[in-house]
Amino acid sequence: MEFPPEGYRRGVGICLFNSSGKIFAASRLNRPEIWEMPQGGINEGEDLKTAAKRELIEETGIVSAEIIAELPYWLSYDFSPEVSIKHIKHWGVRYKGQTHKWFLMKLTGKDEEINLLGNGTERQEFGEWSWMSIERLLNQANKSRKPVYEQVMKEFGKFIHGNGDNDISLKQSETQLVS
């Protein structure tokens, strides 16, 4: 699907992995039992790759990462009616859920760069972080996002573990340092 579905808040998701093949995840400040990969909205007129880099920096402080791949389609999940209504205050619009374009990024720096205060431009969203196996991440993901995460891991897992060179279902991105 080239265009995002109607009625969903558009965003980007980042599946960040390290040289050990582990996935970056962080626990929500307001719900510490829930672990997520970085994600966020797209600013008006913003390029998707730029949005992914910005969100990674805002939420994790990480600037040393390169884009490895991009899903060629959008992945969506629905909000419960209660959550949908709650978000009206925050976004000013009632959305059915969120839809994201997912990027696979590799950490090129060191763990010491990670700062959950981000770059200070946005409020802190995460309380703790960890490098996780795909299985552990899927076990600790929010149930509404689990199907999306399963699809992300299905597509990106072969890159993370080094055997995705010939996969034509993904759009290879040029190597770029986040800056």
Image: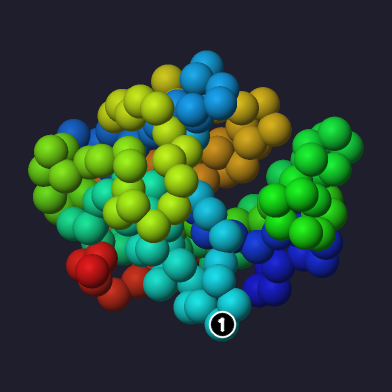
Q: Residue at x 67, y 26 (%)?
A: 143
Q: Which residue is mark 1?
A: 45
Q: Residue 144, image x and y in percent?
A: 70, 33
Q: Residue at x 50, y 29 (%)?
A: 28
Q: Quadrant of residue 8?
A: bottom right
Question: Residue 16, can we see it?
Answer: no
Where the C terminus falls, by quadrant?
bottom left
**Residue depicted at 57% across the width and 60% down the height:** 41
Question: In the displayed image of the protein, which residue is found farthest to the bottom?
Answer: 45
Amino acid type, residue under disc 1 in the picture: Gly
- Foreground of the two, 31 or 47: 31
Residue 35 picture location, percent across and down? 48, 27
Quadrant showing the N terminus: bottom right
- Nearer to us in this view, 107 or 30: 30
Q: Measured from the top left, where is residue 72 in percent x and y?
A: 55, 67
Q: Is residue 131 visible?
A: yes
Task: Answer left or right for 92 relative to 65.
Answer: right
Quarter of the image where one finds residue 85: top right
Q: Residue at x 25, y 51 (%)?
A: 62
Left or right, residue 66 beside residue 10: left
Using the image as rendered, state which of residue 61 and residue 137 is in the foreground. 61
Q: Secondary structure at mark 1?
A: loop
Figure check: 42 above or below 56: below
Q: Position of residue 64 (x, y in %)?
A: 18, 57
